[in-house]
């Protein structure tokens, strides 16, 4: 080997070492930067009372997401501002409250199982606004509620049109139990385990229940002896009809409000949504059905029992007008909520 060839070989070895050293330094710098961001997330999480990090600007979250060697994972949920929520239906408002409570409870479970200086999972509530809209497009979030998971080693580039977060990284519900299952399937930490609440039945509850049944049977027997059983059954049937048509059971199950507020803060009984209602709206509509039924009964059966012609005429006209006006009110509410035109025998009402 000539002296020139040896010199060239030495230069190549030196160049290779310099490139490797530069790459290693760059990698160490990136790793150091991500460790600093990890500490920043820990600080932001513990500054918040519930551990939930609220972000409303792209510049605050972009550095936390980009790259592929993050020493942490983030769970990002959509947050709608109050003004936007006021214009949405009751169902959306309920989802917004439920997903926030689910995230806060998940943080509580995680903090109870992991030491503060070892936390590597953080929950972010990202506000939807003009500034963050493009970021939501990159995350392919098109509905509410939607929560996305960005794992540690998932490559995120702000220059790509999307972050390529598959369905396994998405949660589109707000139920706490299902949210825990989503987190457990994603991380397998054994932390987010939802336990079904056990119903404790005490001896007192059993005795009280049987006591109520015996008392009700005794009352029915007493009413039957007095000849009041049939009227009581009729009243009971009316009550069952009123409760069934009011939607009270659904309102109780889904924790719907008595009334909602409009954008000016004024109470609003009726909701312009054919899938939702308030408790007061259901009570008003079911009461209107009973008014129509009572008016028809009064016009058909009660009116003919009167002997005095003037009083009978006034009673029949009053029953007819009240029934027609209430029916018109029901039809008007139906058209307003459903945007559909009601037809009877081919005629529009």
Image (cartoon, helix red, strand yellow):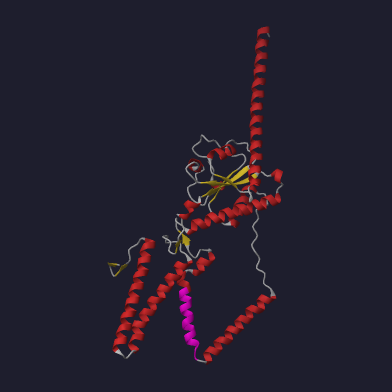
Q: Bounds of the magenta span?
A: 227-242
Is 235 in the magenta? yes
| Relative depth, front residue between 317 and 114 | 317
Q: Residue at x 68, y 44 (%)?
A: 119
The reply to whether residue 2 is visible in this rendering is no
The prevailing secondary structure element of the residues shown in magenta is helix
Q: Position of residue 269 (x, y in %)?
A: 44, 64
The reply to whether residue 230 is visible in this rendering is yes
Q: Position of residue 92 (x, y in %)?
A: 49, 56
| Image-based side of 346 in relation to 115, left or right | left
Q: Quadrant of the N terminus?
A: top right
Answer above or below: position of 109 versus 294: above
Answer above or below: position of 94 versus 158: below
Answer above or below: position of 235 versus 26: below
Is 185 in the magenta? no
Q: Residue at x 68, y 50 (%)?
A: 111
């Amino acid at each position: 080997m000539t002296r020139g060839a040896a010199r060239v070989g030495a230069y190549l070895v030196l160049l290779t070492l310099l490139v490797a050293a530069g790459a290693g330094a760059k990698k160490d710098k990136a790793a150091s930067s991500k460790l600093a961001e990890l500490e920043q997330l820990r600080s932001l999480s513990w500054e918040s009372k519930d551990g939930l990090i609220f972000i409303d600007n792209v510049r605050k979250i972009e550095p936390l997401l980009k790259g592929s060697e993050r020493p942490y994972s983030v769970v990002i949920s959509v947050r709608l501002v109050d003004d936007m929520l006021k214009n949405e239906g009751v169902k959306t408002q309920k989802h917004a409250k439920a997903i926030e409570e689910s995230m806060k409870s998940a943080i509580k479970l995680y903090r109870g199982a992991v030491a503060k200086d070892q936390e590597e999972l953080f929950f972010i509530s990202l506000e939807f606004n003009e500034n963050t809209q493009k970021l939501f497009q990159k995350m392919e979030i098109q509905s509410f509620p939607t929560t996305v998971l960005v794992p540690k080693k998932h490559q995120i580039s702000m220059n790509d049109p999307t972050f390529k977060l598959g369905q396994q990284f998405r949660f589109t519900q707000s139920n706490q139990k299902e949210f825990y299952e989503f987190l457990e399937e994603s991380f397998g930490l054994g932390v987010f385990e939802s336990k079904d609440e056990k119903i404790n039945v005490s001896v007192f509850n059993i005795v009280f229940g049987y006591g109520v049944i015996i008392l009700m049977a005794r009352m029915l027997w007493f009413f039957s002896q007095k000849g009041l059983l049939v009227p009581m059954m009729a009243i009971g049937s009316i009550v069952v009809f009123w409760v069934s048509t009011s939607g009270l059971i659904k309102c109780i199950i889904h924790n719907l409000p008595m009334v909602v507020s409009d954008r000016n803060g004024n109470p609003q009984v009726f909701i312009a949504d054919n899938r939702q209602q308030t408790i007061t709206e259901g009570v008003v509509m079911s009461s209107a059905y009973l008014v129509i039924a009572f008016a028809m009964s009064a016009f058909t059966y009660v009116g003919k029992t009167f002997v005095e012609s003037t009083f009978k005429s006034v009673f029949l006209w009053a029953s007819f007008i009240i029934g027609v006006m209430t029916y018109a009110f029901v039809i008007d509410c139906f058209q307003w909520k459903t945007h559909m035109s009601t037809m009877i025998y081919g005629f529009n009402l």
